[in-house]
Image: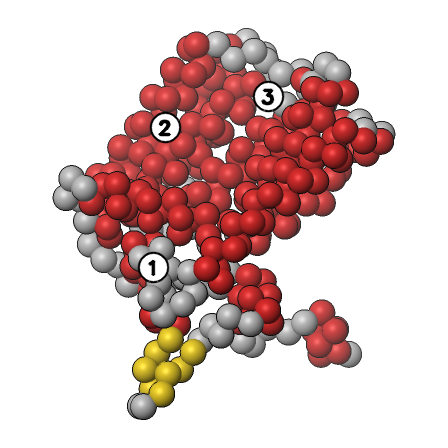
Amino acid sequence: MGKSQPLTAADRQIAFVLGAIVAGLYFRAVPLDLLPGDAGEFQFAAWNFGLAHATGYPLYMIVGGLWQHLWAVIGVSPAASLNLLSAIYGGAAAALLFLLLARALPGDPVPRRLAAALAATYLAANPTFRSQALQAEVYTLQALLLVAVFWAAWRLPEGETPRAEATRFAGLAFIYGLALTHHATALLLAPALLLYLFLWQRDWWRNGRAWALGIPAGLAPLLLYLYVPLRSGPDASPWYHQRLGDGVLTLYDGSARAFVDFVTGRSISVGFLGPGEAFARLG
């Protein structure tokens, strides 16, 4: 593993200014109205602390709902405030990426900062990333969480004792658990994280304290999924209990099977094949 460069007050100030500029530029372009598609669904569901589409995005719903109600006190519309929150997540992701690279890159401070700022700016200016920062969507929060995973992983070698290593490992496990709970695409990062751990220290897995702290820390964010059954009723999520003639069309029935299908995304995987079916088609 490379040697980390110490962060200075100047690094933190640059990161703050960079993040503020990015978020400010996003703010200028953020629509303040209710949006169509998934963004409109999130704007409405978060305000009611209800369910969005699978996998539910409980972290986004809870934080987003609290954010909407906070700004509603001073008259900011729920639709506008949730759009603006995506812009803030985007600016924070760019700022944290700058700090990560300012620590990880070798060389003198000035070229390191320039390279880190260029990389963070490139992320912020990416058309796809920018489009997600201008609407109520889950992806800029996921980007922030993934950069935080990289940050925690990079700090692992800084633990000078087995106890310190275990504490940093638990921090990494918790942040990765949050990212995985927020969006299942974080699972794709698992092989790279395992490779990184073995490159860092071949016998890292022998640290019993790391497992004792890391397993609960990694699993704790999964408790957020309790939000799904708790907020799936007709009061919080009436759109999952549609009137159909004289009856009700229940789209989430609260059963264990419905819960598993919902949080794994199987309930919206129409047209997708399982591994066995996919390989059978190849034959």
Residue 95 place in picture, x, y as percent: 42, 27
Q: Label 2: which residue?
A: 19
Counting residues from the N terminus, which is met first, the one under dot 3 or under dot 1?
A: 1
Q: Earlier in the sequence, mark 2 or mark 1?
A: 2
Write the residue at 20% across / 54% down.
Answer: 33
Residue depicted at x 49% and y 62%: 229
Left or right relative to 223: residue 89: left
111 lies above or below 33: above
Q: Position of residue 6 (x, y in %)?
A: 56, 11
Q: Nearer the viewer, residue 222 or 230?
A: 230
Label 3 vs label 1: CA separation? 39 Å
> What residue is rendered at 74% in x and 34% in y?
212
Q: Around disc 1, counting alpha carbons within 10 Å, would you say few (fewer than 14), some (14 to 19), or many (20 or more)?
A: many
Disc ID at residue 45: 1
Contact between labelled residues 3 and 2, with CB atoms less than 8 Å apart: no
Q: Amino acid at mark 2?
A: Gly
Give me the C-alpha separation between circle 2 and circle 3: 19 Å
Q: Do the CB atoms of the residues marked 2 and 1 lie less than 8 Å apart?
A: no
Q: Which numbered marker is on residue 104?
A: 3
Q: CA distance from mark 2 to mark 1?
A: 28 Å
Q: Amino acid at mark 1?
A: Ala
Horizontal and vertical percent for residue 8? 48, 9
Seen from the viewer's position, the closer of residues 84 and 115 is 84
Question: Can you see residue 129?
Answer: no
